Image (tube, coloured by chain):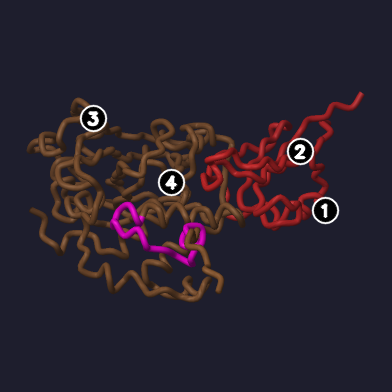
Chain colours: A brown, B red
Amino acid sequence: MIEKQYLLNSRQVAEFVARGFLRFDELVPDEINQAAMTAFDAGGIQSYPAGTPLSQCYPEPSPIGRMLRMPEIQGIIHSLVGPDPLFDHHAIHVRQPNEGKAQGMHGDSIIDTRMHFDIQIMYFPHDVPLEMGGTLLVPGSQYRRINEMDIARYQNFVGQIPMVCKAGSILVLHHGIWHCGRQNQTDRKRYMYKIRLNPRVRQYRLWNTDDLDEAKGESQPIFAGEKRSDIQAILAQREPWFEDGEGRLEIVNRIKQWRFLTGDDNFDVHYWLTRLENMPENRLEMA
Amino acid sequence: MAQFRQKVLVLYLANSALDSAVKGWTMYDGTGQEAHTTGDSAEPPYPTGVDALKDGWRVIQFPQLIPPYPGLEYTTSFQKYEFVFEKLEEMS
């Protein structure tokens, strides 16, 4: 059982719903980072059949197992995909020194239209300065329906995030987020370990919901939300790369995802869905 | 006879107007002098599409305005406002 203190809170989950990722800097201790680097340099780590419960993967003395069994990581996993999710696949991504180009922009796997979602955990066991690249992600792109490398022609977006970080940092991604491995312009190899996890339970209020009602926010004047810090405001925050019209549709995507996760079918942001759902059928009786 | 090579600039704009803000960008250089790749710049090359025209780029494709397919009115996908520009560079 996960102690509540390690679970995400409602604002953190809303941030994940809005932007498609959460970032935890320098979370993993250096001892594990060093052990992971040694394992990667030695040629890799054992994989498991897709669909294996995570609890059956990476037995001791695996450094990856130690990282994944940290209570902070377990709390993140539980909050987003529930207890003991399924191992989908993992990979140690290596960007070679002084590469000629970056990886093309893509979404992982294939087009995936579920409201249910997988998470991908990216683990950076060493410092990643900007010239080493870092994974590039496009925040808020997770609801765009594209198929893998369809989007490889997109080189840059306003507001894109290169993962520049210290050793032991963790990215947790919605499966649909657009990303790529940036060019490594140093003379050192860059490592990043990634694991994809599938939920085994309905993704319904899996985080610490103690703050859910307080953070939800009351109905507000339309367009009043961005300067507040409640869930409506978090879900209303546009990314700099959003187009004018599509950016509004992204807020609708987030509202639908939040309704799915909370079971609150009346939740709304800026009246976007309530307006569309207003289809009165009662007839006015004339005197 | 002069030899020319094509440079291509793709701008993803905020809406269908050429003078709207740049949200994304891609460049390919047929002269071989520059090598562009994913995630290689944080700032857009121009504030708007019209600013690219003022710098000598010729727009060669406007995105068509296509109504949403029934049932997909609220679905988001690719960048809709993709404008393609070119410059022809004379090779010495």
Please tell me whether mark 2 sits on a helix, a strand or a loop.
strand
- Residue furthest to the front in view is A287
The picture places residue A28, in percent across and down from the top left corner, at: 21, 53
The residue indicated by pointer 1 is B54
How far is mark 4 from mark 3, CA to CA? 29 Å
Please tell me whether mark 1 sits on a helix, a strand or a loop.
helix
| Near-viewer residue (A36 or A89) | A89
The picture places residue B23, in percent across and down from the top left corner, at: 61, 53
Rendered-image quadrant of the C terminus of chain A: bottom right
Label 1 is placed on what type of residue?
A: Lys
Label 4 is placed on what type of residue?
A: Gln
How far is mark 2 from mark 4, CA to CA? 28 Å
How far is mark 1 from mark 2, CA to CA? 17 Å
The residue indicated by pointer 3 is A44
Total number of numbered discs in the rendering: 4
Q: Nearer the viewer, mark 3 or mark 2?
A: 2
Q: Which mark is on residue A65?
A: none
How far is mark 1 from mark 4, CA to CA? 35 Å
Q: Does mark 2 fall on the same chain as mark 1?
A: yes
